[in-house]
Amino acid sequence: LFFKGKVSCVSEAKQVFEQIDQPNHISYTAMINAYGLNGLGHDALELYYQMPTEMIVEKTYACILNACSHSGLVNEARSIFSTISMKNKWIYTAMIDCLSRSFFFEEAKHLIEEFERYDSPYVPMYVSLLSGARNQNNVSLARETIHRIQELFQNADEYLVSASTLFTNILASSGELDEASQMRHDMYRSGAKKRSGLSWTEINGEVAKFRVQDRSHPRTQEIYNELDRIESELIEHGHKFDSSWITRPMMPDETVESILNSHSERLALAYNFIQRPIPSRIQIVKNLRICGDCHGAIKLISRIRQCQIVIRDANRIHHFADGKCSCNDHF
Ligand SMILES: [Zn+2]
Ligand SMILES: [Zn+2]
């Protein structure tokens, strides 16, 4: 059940769940989580309210709040949150994430303060605020948040890098180009290591793995030719390649298009399109969060090429079909 939910086969997960004679707290929680990860917040809520209250554990609360968060169900999340007597950091984080996604920043900050009265600061709460600030293009909140992160979490390398990347992106997309390039430069000089993007896709039982800018696959030439075709189709359908998602200095022989086109999930996607027959449902797993340019491009590709594309990234599962994504752009 846990596995099916994670790989995005919600209907199969549901079948497994329904065959369980007497579901326990683990099976309920796994099913709620499967709905949540796949953007089915209402189904998650329905099951949560059917669940016998004595079975509800802390993990269940975190899962249902995450499910609400990913579907933008703020009021439902608020009312569940208010019933929880013992709240741990995951429960707080899920609620703060939910509020930040819907731009209730004051309420989110208030919860962070409440949490920090009794506990030490927890960096994912601030990353949620920062993601919310990005979705609203709210530079002042982003600046305030990144300063808090730098001040509180000097040793949390991995988080510092991803938070700084997010902040650079916010600056760039709000037109603060000088500050953005300064930030990029500082990160580059400090030797901050970003984890590099990796994507996996399974075709005919074989798993292919792609790094960002990968040229090691035996069918590399075909893959890049396909990406060129996809690029023309995207441009023809009005896609604007968004350079604000590029988080490193550009080399002289590179273009905005060439950098974004070689993101690992795009290579994995093109590899699917050069198969004959083309898989009816394309499935990709990515180790990091999908960037905004890939998200927008893949939405469009799902419409242009009339196919279903499922991408599981570090944060959630995206079902792309007919020009839309199941996350409603809450990513
Ligand atoms: Zn990307
Ligand atoms: Zn999405």
Image (cartoon, helix red, strand yellow):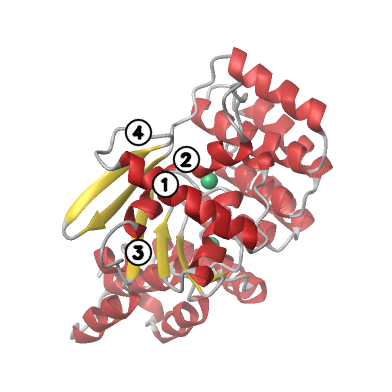
Q: Which residue is mark 2?
A: 262
Q: Residue at x 68, y 61 (%)?
A: 238
Give the amino acid at mark 3: Ile
Give the amino acid at mark 4: Arg
Q: Earlier in the sequence, mark 4 or mark 2?
A: 4
Q: Which residue is mark 4?
A: 215
Secondary-structure class at tag 1: helix
Q: Determine the CA span between mark 3 and mark 4.
A: 21 Å
Q: Position of residue 115 (x, y in %)?
A: 62, 48
**Residue 111 versus residue 36 in the image, above or below:** above
Q: Which residue is mark 3?
A: 282
Whether residue 49 is visible, yes or no, is yes
Foreground of the two, 55 or 271: 271
Secondary-structure class at tag 2: loop
Q: Earlier in the sequence, mark 4 or mark 1?
A: 4
Q: Earlier in the sequence, mark 2 or mark 3?
A: 2
